[in-house]
Amino acid sequence: MKREGKSNHAGPRDSSDGAPLPRPLPSRKPKSQFIKPRLTLFTSTLWEYPSQHYGDTIQGDKNYIGATPSWVIWQCLTRYTKQNDLVIDPMCGSGTTLDVCKDLKRRALGFDLASHTRRPDIRRADARNLPVENSKADFVFVDPPYSTHVRYSDDPNCIGRLDALDPGHENNYYQAMRRVISEIHRILKPGANMALYVSDSHRKDEGFAPIGFNLFSIMRERLRPVDIVAVVRHNAKLDKGNYRKAADEGNFMMRGFNYLFIMQRP
Ligand SMILES: C[S@@+](CC[C@H](N)C(=O)[O-])C[C@H]1O[C@@H](n2cnc3c(N)ncnc32)[C@H](O)[C@@H]1O
């Protein structure tokens, strides 16, 4: 009589009958292949996606330091605009916003001080003085310099040259951004929305600049808050030993999220 659970075929079971156990086959690890999840509209105010870009193509330029994750722009445009709406990015860098607009069939205008040499569809302009008529835009997306973290260009008008942590001169950054925000307000249609994507700044031994809250209060002078989203940063620096060590020794924290402030022109 067969005992419960004991089978007749050779397999990895006890060898109570004295037969040697068969050797296990060498394990073949399946090659790990990263598959991006399909991007769908997020429903909470905490946004995270495991890649800089959505889909099979690249939006913007993956080698552009300081490029915006394209899926953040995709979320904004999908939620707050419709086909053929005019979207304007006054600091458009490598043109990520323009590419997302193409994907979503929105009309787009992109400006930057420096990047016009990279692509002909980005026009050279200072974001404080845009060549756009009043009340034209259905949506504005902007990812400005967060103080001096990245050197975007040698243009003396680059706002990325103004240090929000420089004692006595920190207001230069906020004054410049106040003019950018005033220009965004001017070009937005009444009732239209804008999104500003930004991070605070912390420099070892120099301290902390709450850039997000400061820009939010400047925006509130003219614009109505619609929502505030925290966007998880997948920054390779966060995992690097020397950065972690500096943060541990200096008892400060690295930036783990960006703000996405969504505002409306009343
Ligand atoms: C964070 S990057 C924008 C990244 C862009 N969204 C992308 O995905 O590539 C900030 C940009 O602001 C631009 N910039 C700085 N000062 C400016 C100004 N006064 N007017 C227009 N653009 C400016 C820089 O040249 C830089 O390209």
Image (cartoon, grey):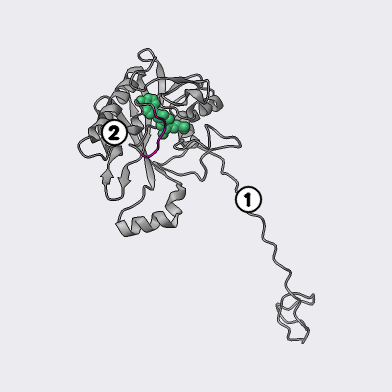
Q: Residue at x 32, y 24 (%)?
A: 180
* Rendering quarter of residue 28: bottom right
Is residue 175 in view from this perspective? yes
Q: Residue at x 35, y 13 (%)?
A: 134
Residue position marked by numbered label 1 in the rendering:
33
Looking at the picture, which amino acid does disc 2 mark? Leu
Drawn side of residue 253 relative to residue 71, left or right: left
- SS class, disc 1: loop
Residues in magenta, as a range: 149-154
Residue position marked by numbered label 2 in the rendering:
215
Give the quadrant of the N terminus: bottom right
Between residue 107 and residue 253, name the one nearer to us: 253
> Residue 153 magenta-drawn?
yes
Looking at the picture, which amino acid does disc 1 mark? Gln
Residue 170 is situated, as x and y percent measured from the top left of the image, at: 24, 35
Labelled disc at residue 181? none
Is 203 placed above or below 108 here? below
Q: Residue at x 63, y 54 (%)?
A: 32
Between residue 45 and residue 249, name the one nearer to us: 249
Residue 241 is situated, as x and y percent measured from the top left of the image, at: 43, 57
Residue extending farthest to the top is 133
